[in-house]
Amino acid sequence: MFKTRPFFRTGMSFAAVVAVSLSAGCASAGGEKPSPAPGERLLPITNTIGMTLVHIPPGEFFMGSPEGEDGRNPDEMQHRVRLTKGFHLGATEVTQKQWREVMGTTVAQQRDKANPVWALCGEEDGDPVYYVSWEEAGTFCERLSRKEGKKYRLPTEAEWEYACRAGTETPFHAGATLRPDQANYESTGANEIGTIVAGRQGTTRAGSFPPNRWGLFDMHGSVLEWCGDWEGSYPISKGIAVDPQGVPKGMLRVLRGGCWDFVLRGCRSATRSGAPPAYRDDIIGFRVALDS
């Protein structure tokens, strides 16, 4: 079923939005270079629902993108950020099996909350869950926290980008670009010899593609990931933003990472998107953070 995404916002240009917002259903800023990870990394942990979380150490990085980066948007003003506390982050997005164990609903039932005629784009246990609102992602974290006796939450936008970059300053954690065998994004188009290469048009098993250097999978593409912050402008300051939490209020919650229905420039480490907290879509999921 052909559908539009009326409330979804991405920082991409209008032309790019037209290209990626319709679903057929299935060089750095000046100054001293920040230290990517001065803290000692702890071992990954696995919780009672089989979710692996990797340790992200405290450190500093340049958040946003340099002016010359291909696909850059005006809301990606590059600035220096310091994260003073380490945390754990899901090695993958929350899977459909993990979602059912905590919330009790299938991805089809999640879809029905939006529109029962909309398509399903992957229903395997190991696929990321989607059609999940920001509010429901928060409820998942609350229930998992009670179950585990630990503090699960959504990552902040700064934590998300820091973890995605894993010490890199390039558009993607793997370098200047990504190949279709490195992430699940909309790769429809001609390859280097002119052959048409089709996009996957749906989800793939979480962890199917190579991780970044910190052991995180699917930070580019797959499904968009909710963050805890309200969407808003970055701080305009020459100083260091310490443990930023985003603006105090807004209309949209931050989404990061791009998705299977976005062209590659919409999946960069710095690309910002947003949607209302109650919004759900077949391109939106999440991963959880855990205070260390």
Image (tube, grey):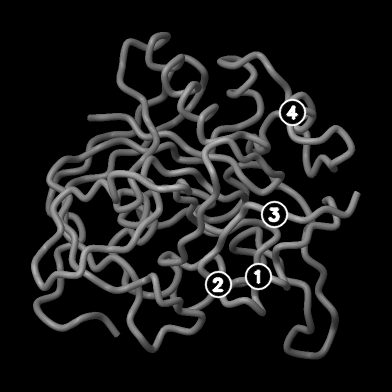
Ranked by sequence position, the earlier of labels 3 and 1 is 3
Type of amino acid at the residue the image marks with label 2: Met
- Residue 8: x %, y % from top left: 61, 54
Q: Which residue is mark 4?
A: 113
Q: Is residue 80 above or below residue 150?
A: below
- What is the distance, in whole Å, between disc 4 and disc 1 at their CAs? 25 Å
| Contact, mark 1 vs mark 2 (Cβ under 8 Å) | yes
The one of 274 and 258 positioned closer to us in this rendering: 274
Crowd rating for badge 4 (residues with CA inside 10 Å; few <14, some 14–19, many 20+): few
Type of amino acid at the residue the image marks with label 1: Val
Q: Secondary structure at mark 2?
A: loop
When asked about the image quadrant of residue 200, the answer is bottom right
- Residue 199: x %, y % from top left: 77, 65
Left or right: 277, with 215 as reference point: right
- What is the distance, in whole Å, between disc 1 and disc 2 at their CAs? 6 Å
Q: Residue at x 32, y 58 (%)?
A: 166
Q: Secondary structure at mark 1?
A: helix
Crowd rating for badge 3 (residues with CA inside 10 Å; few <14, some 14–19, many 20+): few
Q: Which residue is mark 1?
A: 17
* Label number found at residue 12: 2
Ranked by sequence position, the earlier of labels 2 and 3 is 3
Q: Which residue is mark 3?
A: 6
Q: Residue at x 61, y 42 (%)?
A: 206
Type of amino acid at the residue the image marks with label 3: Pro
